[in-house]
């Protein structure tokens, strides 16, 4: 399925006029990525007994949002990253101005893809509203804002940190799962799917926090206070590695319960989440 | 009407959770502006015999797009402006990171406002598609990309320059006029209205080019080659001030003909455009 998503993304972006900004947008959109969110969405559609091809355009729109957020987050004024998905970041290749415009383009493109899709008008409006809410100023953007603010003013409680993780990472995972529910007309499942998305986001972020410490410990070769590795607050500022591991395990237990409630145990989405939670780095 | 638009913008933005990014977005969205595009749209709705209040949400969505584009264009990596609408630019007050995120928020908010509005689903989808097309990678963003590219590689023909003006400035004016047509179910007028928007955009930009030269001539107090004032190519690189003035006059003549074709002579939209074209700076 990943290749089909990539081909559709290519086709969609080539519908725009050739320009510097299209080149820049294409560079990041088609960079080798895991396509976690699109593939989770398509798997869930299949689990619901529908044809995953049904969700192809929505999957592409999600990837547009994910890529725009990466391109803007990598900018010097934000996280200032030089590499992403194994290649130089967008602004390193095209300069900051085009990277800003490429991000703006991909965000706008997501809504155009949704408006142009073949679903009923009613479903399109539900999807567009969902995209704007999960990606916007009460969702992912708020998460990125809180994350940036914790660089200058450390996060003071685990609860605040987890809320930031929910928003920054959970929102787009929820978006993927809820979008599938809209497409197959299982709107009643949206609330539980939203929670699954948030829990996945929390769990992934806490796992990252643990991996960072373990990796740093291995590299430094000695024990260092877990919250002192860099200026960024992580879950390990509030708990031990053991406690963090337990929290991840309990989040996955809740996810399993949620999937059970939705009769989605022994499903592809369950297998995918199990695979994602089993990663070792 | 301007005050009503401002009040609605305030109400819409305060529906988001209180945060740094909401403050930054609000700062630019509610900065004192002429609200040209929203007011053109509301005037046109009235000219068509409908209640302008019908268009309030769409007018606000247009202002969200206009403001996002200003916030991003003012960034140091783009036009690097310090003042806008009589106050310091967004990044000067909130920093670059929040300015980028505030722009992203306002762009996303435009689509949320449209999705949440009270129009029929059919009209909403038409509006969302129009917004994405005029503001996106084949529209306004392409215009800004071309404008930036002409800073390093001078624009070589009047035609290229005018195309850039159409995209950079005309697209959002067309958006305002076409949106009114969608709301009052005059879709057949959209093509002519689109042309009016583009022509207004061209005319405004050429007028700006003329004002810049006249002002600089007054300030410097001597004649200077019209295309040498700064690195930016203007219409005066390809014609004299007299020819530029004639081009503006002919564009307005075409706009009048277009409005006549739509039976919109002696209308509020005509008066507004006449007012805008009569400005002396």
Image: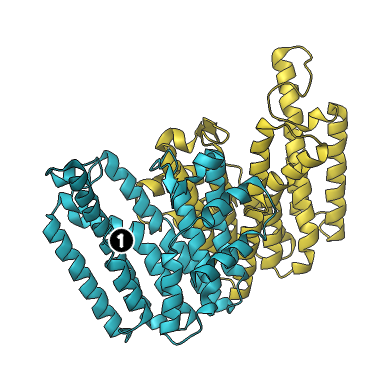
Chain colours: A cyan, B yellow
Is A188 placed above or below A91 here? below
**Camera-side residue of B183 and A82:** A82
Say left or right for A166 vs A179: left
Count how many numbered circles sit on residues in the image.
1
Residue identifier under label 1: A166
The answer to whether residue B10 is visible is no
Residue at image position (62%, 74%) is B122
Residue A120, quarter of picture: bottom right
Looking at the image, can residue A162 be seen? yes
Residue B59, located in which quarter of the rendered image?
Answer: bottom right
Q: Quadrant of the C terminus of chain B?
A: top right
Q: Residue at x 69, y 29 (%)?
A: B232
Residue B147: x percent and y percent?
A: 67, 38
Above or below for A258 versus B116: below
Residue B278 is situated, as x and y percent measured from the top left of the image, at: 77, 37
Q: Nearer the viewer, residue A80 or A161?
A: A80
> Which one is in front, A238 or B26?
A238
Category of crowding for the residue at label 1, using alpha-carbon neighbours closer than 10 angstroms: few (below 14), some (14–19), many (at least 20): many
From the viewer's side, name the closer residue of A61 and A34.
Answer: A34
- Residue A102 in the image, given as x and y percentages of width and height: 56, 49
Q: Is residue A123 above or below residue B183?
A: below
Report helix, strand or loop for mark 1. Answer: helix
Identify the residue at horizontal 79%, vertical 33% (top origin).
B235
**What chain does mark 1 sit on?**
A
Q: Is residue B269 left or right of residue B259?
A: left
Q: Position of residue B143 (x, y in %)?
A: 67, 45
């Amino acid at each position: 399925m990943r290749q089909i998503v990539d081909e559709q993304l290519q086709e969609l972006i080539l519908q725009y006029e050739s320009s510097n900004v299209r080149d820049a947008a294409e560079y990041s959109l088609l960079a080798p990525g895991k396509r976690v969110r699109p593939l989770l969405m398509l798997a869930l559609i299949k689990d619901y007994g529908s044809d995953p091809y049904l969700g192809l355009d929505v999957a592409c729109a999600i990837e547009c949002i994910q890529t725009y957020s990466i391109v803007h987050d990598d900018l010097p004024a934000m996280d200032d990253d030089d590499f992403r998905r194994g290649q130089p970041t967008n602004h390193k290749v095209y300069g900051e101005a085009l990277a800003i415009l490429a991000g703006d383009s991909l965000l706008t493109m997501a809504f155009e893809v949704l408006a142009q899709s073949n679903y009923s008008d009613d479903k399109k409006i539900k999807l567009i509203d969902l995209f704007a809410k999960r990606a916007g100023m009460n969702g992912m953007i708020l998460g990125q804002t809180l994350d940036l603010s914790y660089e200058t003013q450390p996060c003071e409680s685990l609860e605040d940190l987890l809320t930031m993780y929910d928003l920054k990472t959970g929102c787009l995972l929820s978006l993927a799962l809820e979008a599938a529910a809209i497409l197959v007309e299982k709107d009643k499942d949206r609330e539980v799917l939203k929670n699954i998305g948030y829990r996945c986001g929390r769990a992934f972020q806490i796992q990252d926090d643990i991996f960072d410490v373990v990796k740093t410990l291995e590299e430094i070769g000695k024990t260092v206070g877990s919250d002192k590795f860099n200026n960024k607050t992580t879950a390990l500022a509030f708990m031990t590695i053991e406690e963090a591991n337990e929290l991840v395990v309990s989040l996955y237990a809740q996810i399993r319960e949620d999937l059970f409630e939705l009769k989605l145990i022994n499903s592809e989405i369950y297998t995918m989440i199990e695979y994602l939670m089993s990663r070792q780095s």
